């Protein structure tokens, strides 16, 4: 799954280019940098690799989301419909621009349920933000249709699905804008970094300025830049971009290994009739960073988890129902409006409502779901052993439940 598994000479060489000149900043210093522009090079590579017209690197995936929202004109009082299963960064970005997160159910794709999105639309809805969780993708045709019909912005949080495609197009390039994260555990890593991709020149120019204090980057030097709007500092550094450049060149290799390991493990688990798999809207476009699968009941799933834990082999098998990074159930700080600074009344009201909002469909799915991370570095031996141990634990959990009945 994560690019950090294959960190090597390629990354060191790129970083050394930057260390040779000592120009660690992505803008300015045109003379002393001796033609080394790692961030610019990485943005070009991203456009080419994913088929996006424009790319703006940022300091993180979270700041990429914030930047995209700002550039798309989403702010105070605007409602953004997002899934109850995601990473906390998704709602952090929403709150950071003054907007209101409206959380809705996921379906068996483990991403936004289009019907739940429809039901959640109000006069204040401005944006629909699918989150392409765990390497796969949302039903983008259905969501795009909803957005077109209701004049809403489609913003893709594709941070977890680098390399996934939907009907031939890379996720993150299909909405008005899309984001990737290059944090340390993502498919390709910069240590910390992210990107906003868009096909709109207007949105891109706004992202470019917003991530650098509003600089218009038109002056002969930074001192001569104008500031047509207020920005922040969400810049990436040249050192980070250098790592990313080495990593993106390995992406095809990462994806091929993931696909191979994923296919093997899926075939192994498919031998058990009680195991079912996550729906993938475009199966050929799965980036295969995770294999997500279901057991028949919450009890059996818990028994599986307990058995794997007891054997000390649970690592890499995520049971998200009680996970406090990824699922609404344990986002107590969000539901309690736990902000360090005053939120708007509209935001406070929306968060208070989350306390009593029920997510029965998502609860059921998440309570029966295991997402198995697919490593790049597994040997065939290790993969075989992993499959065997998982099968044994599943069989034991199923047997216990049939005895209990
Ligand atoms: C990783 C991630 C982000 C952004 O993360 P950063 O750590 O800030 O780069 C956003 N959304 C999702 C779904 C993620 O998994």
Image: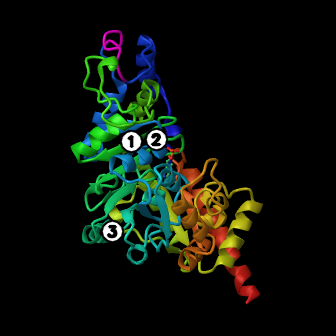
Q: Percent position (x, y) of residue 218? A: 25, 25
Which stretch did the figure color magenta?
27-34
Is mark 2 in CB contact (under 8 Å) with mark 1?
yes
Queried on whether the Cβ of the residue with tag 2 lies below 8 angstroms from ligand 1, the answer reads: yes
Residue 143 has which mark? Answer: 3
Quadrant of residue 343 within the rendered picture: bottom right
> Magenta segment: does it hold 333?
no
Please state if 80 lies on the left or on the right of 86 as rendered: left
Secondary element under disc 2, as helix, strand or loop, is loop
- Residue lying furthest top: 32
Q: Which residue is mark 1?
A: 195
Crowding at dot 3, Cα within 10 Å, few <14 / some 14-19 / many 20+, comes out as: many
Queried on whether the Cβ of the residue with tag 1 lies below 8 angstroms from ligand 1, the answer reads: no
Name the residue located 48 percent from the left edge and 40 percent from the top edge: 60
Give the vertical position of 330 relative to 75 (above or below). below
**From mark 2 to mark 3, how far is it between C-alphas?**
25 Å
Residue 359 has which mark? Answer: none
Q: Viewer-proximal residue, 393 or 384? A: 393
Name the residue located 28 percent from the left edge and 45 percent from the top edge: 203
**From mark 3 to mark 1, how far is it between C-alphas?**
22 Å
Q: Which residue is mark 2?
A: 182
Q: Percent position (x, y) of residue 112? A: 43, 68
Name the residue located 59 percent from the left edge and 63 percent from the top edge: 327
> Magenta segment: does it hold 29?
yes
Give the vertical position of 96 relative to 216 (above or below). below
- Precedes in sequence: disc 3 or disc 1: 3
User: Does residue 77 appear anywhere in the picture?
Assistant: yes
Crowding at dot 1, Cα within 10 Å, few <14 / some 14-19 / many 20+, comes out as: many
């Amino acid at each position: 799954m994560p690019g950090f598994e294959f960190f090597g000479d390629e990354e060191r060489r790129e970083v050394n280019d930057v260390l040779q000149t000592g120009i660690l900043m992505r803008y300015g210093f045109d003379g002393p940098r001796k033609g080394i522009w790692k961030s610019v090079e990485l943005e070009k590579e991203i456009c080419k690799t994913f088929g996006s017209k424009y790319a703006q690197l940022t300091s993180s995936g979270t700041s990429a989301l914030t930047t995209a929202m700002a550039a798309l004109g989403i702010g105070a009082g605007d409602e953004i419909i997002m899934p109850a299963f995601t990473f906390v960064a998704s709602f952090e970005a929403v709150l950071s621009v003054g907007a209101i997160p409206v959380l809705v159910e996921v379906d068996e794709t483990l991403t936004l349920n289009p019907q739940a999105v429809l039901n959640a639309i109000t006069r204040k809805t401005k944006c629909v933000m699918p989150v392409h969780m765990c390497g796969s993708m949302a039903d983008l045709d259905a969501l795009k249709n909803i957005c077109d019909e209701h004049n809403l912005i489609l913003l893709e949080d594709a941070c977890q699905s680098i390399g996934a495609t939907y009907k031939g197009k890379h996720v993150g390039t299909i909405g008005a804008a899309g984001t990737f994260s290059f944090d340390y555990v993502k498919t390709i890593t910069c240590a910390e970094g992210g990107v906003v991709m868009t096909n709109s020149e207007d949105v891109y120019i706004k992202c470019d300025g917003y991530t650098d204090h509003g600089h218009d980057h038109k002056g002969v030097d930074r001192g001569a830049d104008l500031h047509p709007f207020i920005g922040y500092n969400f810049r990436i550094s040249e050192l980070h971009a250098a790592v990313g450049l080495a990593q993106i060149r390995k992406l095809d290799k990462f994806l091929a290994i993931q696909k191979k390991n994923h296919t093997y493990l899926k075939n192994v688990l498919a031998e058990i009739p009680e195991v079912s798999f996550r729906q993938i809207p475009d199966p050929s476009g799965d980036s295969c960073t995770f294999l997500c699968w279901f057991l028949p009941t919450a009890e059996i799933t818990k028994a599986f988890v307990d058995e794997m834990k007891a054997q000390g082999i649970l690592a890499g098998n995520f049971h998200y129902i009680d996970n406090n990074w990824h699922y609404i159930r344990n986002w107590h700080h969000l539901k309690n409006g736990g902000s360090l600074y005053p939120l708007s009344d509209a935001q406070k009201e929306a968060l208070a409502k989350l306390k009593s909002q029920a997510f029965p469909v998502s609860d059921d799915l998440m309570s029966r779901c295991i997402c198995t991370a697919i490593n790049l570095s597994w040997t065939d031996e290790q993969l075989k052993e992993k499959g065997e141990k998982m099968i044994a634990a599943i069989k034991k959990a199923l047997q216990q439940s049939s005895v209990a009945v």
